[in-house]
């Protein structure tokens, strides 16, 4: 029933005025950051110029306070997050034209290939939305909320997102993948034990990023649990990941690229190719 209501709402809103190019969808239990709407103003600008993106969200599934740091950082994810998100008209018209809106579990369908079509969502490092209770439409409550939702950090002060919009749209996916590939090649490889050393005893030099690899879903679940990440796969990918990589600030005090080994192979080949998904 809820999926039908969402579909009716999207269809009605876009039909209301042909000049509406985007919808912002909010659940009933969200608190928003001071720059929530300016973030989406920036996101709309970028979405209009980058066909490799199909949505934007105010939510980072791994935006726990201990794992995030940079208020003005924006990332991509291959796993639809929801919880305060933007739907472009062009994507809804695709869904309508393809008849791919589901009968149930609309959020899972947004992650599936018939809707995602290899595209990604834009998300902030530090969340611009926070779910304020253990009951509501956003989650089932209980232990899940205490472990993965209550610790989420909500951005405390605004960022001038509209001033950053033009620079964030430059180069699109190709430029983003190039930066990610270089970051992996330049990172200093460490074990999970070193990365979770809260006293920084793992060593390392200066501000160099660290790289921690995982090789399978089981390996990911084990290591993600040690980081305090949401250790769940959706559609064959870790939540909040892009190209098989989750970027966090770890207890060691370093920015850590937690990456699938196939992504590392891709990055180290340095052949200029874009991430196409086989790495994940």
Image (tube, rainbow, N blue to C red):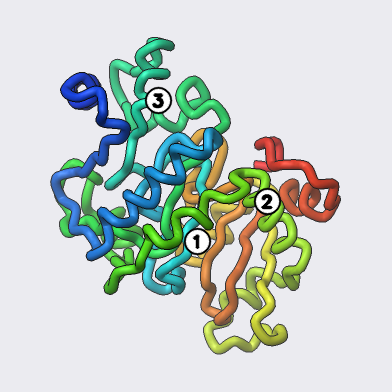
Label 1 SS: helix
Instruction: Report the number of discs.
Output: 3
Question: Mark 3 = which residue?
Answer: 90
Disc with the residue nearer the chain's start (1 vs 3): 3
Number of the front mark, 2 or 1: 2
Secondary structure of the residue carrying tag 3 is helix
| Of callouts 2 and 1, the N-terminal one | 1
Query: In this view of the protein, which residue sits in the foreground, 91 or 241?
Result: 91
> Which residue: 67% across, 71% down?
210
Query: Which quadrant: the N terminus?
Result: top left
Q: Position of residue 252 (x, y in %)?
A: 57, 80
Q: Which residue is mark 1?
A: 225
Q: CA distance from mark 2 to mark 1?
A: 16 Å
Are there few (<14), some (14-19), or many (20+) residues within 10 Å of tag 1? few
Tell me where residue 256 sits by quadrant: bottom right
Tell me: residue 238, above or below residue 71.
above
Q: How far across and down, in percent of the image, does residue 114 sit?
A: 49, 20
> Where residue 19 sits: x, y (%)?
26, 28
The spot of residue 92 in percent (x, y) is 35, 23
**Of the image marks 3 and 2, the number of the one nearer the N terminus:** 3
Q: Is residue 240 above or below residue 107?
A: below
249 or 11, which lies in front? 11
Find disc 2 in the rendering and name its residue: 260
Q: Provide the secondary structure element on which disc 2 rests.
A: strand
Q: Label 3, label 2: how many angstroms apart (C-alpha)?
A: 32 Å
């Amino acid at each position: 029933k809820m999926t039908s209501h969402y579909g009716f709402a999207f269809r009605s809103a876009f039909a209301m005025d042909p000049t509406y190019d985007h919808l912002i969808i909010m659940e009933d239990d969200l608190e928003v950051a001071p720059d929530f709407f300016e973030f989406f103003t920036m996101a709309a600008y970028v979405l209009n110029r980058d066909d490799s993106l199909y949505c934007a969200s105010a939510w980072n599934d791994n935006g726990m306070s201990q794992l995030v740091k940079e208020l003005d950082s924006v990332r991509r994810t291959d796993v639809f997050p929801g919880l305060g998100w933007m739907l472009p008209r062009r994507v809804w018209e695709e869904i309508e034209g393809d008849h791919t809106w589901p009968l149930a579990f609309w959020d899972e369908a947004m992650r599936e290939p018939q809707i995602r079509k290899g595209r990604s969502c834009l998300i902030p490092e530090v969340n611009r939305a926070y779910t304020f209770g253990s009951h509501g439409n956003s989650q089932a409550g209980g232990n899940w909320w205490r472990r993965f939702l209550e610790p989420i950090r909500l951005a405390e002060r605004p960022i001038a997102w509209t001033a950053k919009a033009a620079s964030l749209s430059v180069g699109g996916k190709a430029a983003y993948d190039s930066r990610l590939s270089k970051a992996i090649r330049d990172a200093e490889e460490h074990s999970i034990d070193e990365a979770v050393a809260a006293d920084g005893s793992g060593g390392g030099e200066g501000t160099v990023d660290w790289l921690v690899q995982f090789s399978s879903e089981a390996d990911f679940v084990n290591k993600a649990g040690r980081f305090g990440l949401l250790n769940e796969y959706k559609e064959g990918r870790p939540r909040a990941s892009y190209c098989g990589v989750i970027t966090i600030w770890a207890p060691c005090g370093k920015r850590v690229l937690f990456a699938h080994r196939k992504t590392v192979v891709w990055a180290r080949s340095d052949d200029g190719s874009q991430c196409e998904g086989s790495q994940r």
